[in-house]
């Protein structure tokens, strides 16, 4: 084994440029390695985020399709129930017609007579103005022109 030289600077001994080049290369390799790791990490994070978004979209789509299917089933059930009910009513009506409804139809119910004489809303606009002008009529006593309102 050869002896190592203890004294003197690297410049004086020679090989200074090579050492500088080696250090620069080493530093560049370290930086490049760090950059590569950072890029890989960023890519992985982006892929994870993308995967998460796609998963959420898939889940939402799946839930929407499921809800649509459930709604369709419910609507079909409702329509089926309504149809069944209508058929029952129709069959009952048909049976009543066949047995013969003997009620006298020539004499319908008498017309409803009488009504709201005071509270009519036919002339709302006129009434509104009149009401506004005379709203204090019953609340306070007037001394003159009492009968002309």
Image (cartoon, rainbow, N blue to C red):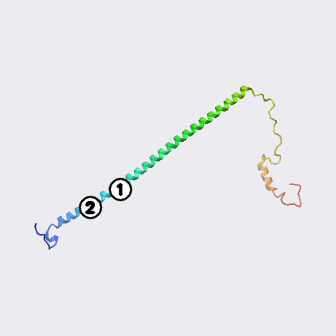
77 displayed left or right of 65: right
Residue in the picture at 65% in, 33% down: 86
101 displayed left or right of 68: right
In the rendered image, the vertical position of residue 85 relative to residue 140, given as above or below: above
Foreground residue among 113 and 108: 108
Q: Count residues near mark 2 (Cα–Cα under 10 Å), then give few for <14, some for 14-19, many for 20+.
A: few
Q: Count residues near mark 1 (Cα–Cα under 10 Å), then give few for <14, some for 14-19, many for 20+.
A: few
Q: Quadrant of residue 88?
A: top right
Residue annotated with mark 1: 42
Q: Which of marks 2 and 1 is nearer the N terminus?
A: 2
For numbered disc 1, what is the local secondary structure?
A: helix
46 displayed left or right of 6: right
Residue in the picture at 76% in, 49% down: 125
Residue annotated with mark 2: 30
Residue 111, position as x, y percentages in the image: 81, 37
Residue 18, position as x, y percentages in the image: 17, 64
Residue 115, position as x, y percentages in the image: 82, 43
For numbered disc 2, what is the local secondary structure?
A: helix
Foreground residue among 82 and 140: 82
Residue in the picture at 71% in, 25% down: 98
């Amino acid at each position: 084994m050869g002896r190592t030289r203890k004294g003197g600077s690297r410049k004086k001994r020679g090989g200074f440029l090579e050492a500088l080049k080696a250090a620069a290369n080493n530093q560049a390799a370290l930086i490049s390695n760090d950059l590569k790791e950072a890029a890989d990490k960023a890519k992985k994070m982006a892929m994870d985020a993308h995967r998460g978004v796609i998963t959420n979209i898939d889940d939402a789509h799946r839930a929407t399709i499921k809800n649509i299917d459930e709604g369709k089933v419910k609507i079909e059930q409702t329509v089926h129930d309504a149809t069944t009910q209508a058929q029952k009513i129709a069959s009952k009506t048909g049976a009543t017609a066949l047995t013969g409804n003997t009620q006298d139809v020539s004499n319908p119910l008498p017309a409803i007579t009488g009504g709201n004489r005071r509270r009519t809303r036919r002339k709302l606009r006129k009434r509104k103005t009149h009401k506004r002008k005379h709203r204090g009529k019953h609340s306070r006593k007037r001394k003159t022109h009492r009968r002309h309102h």
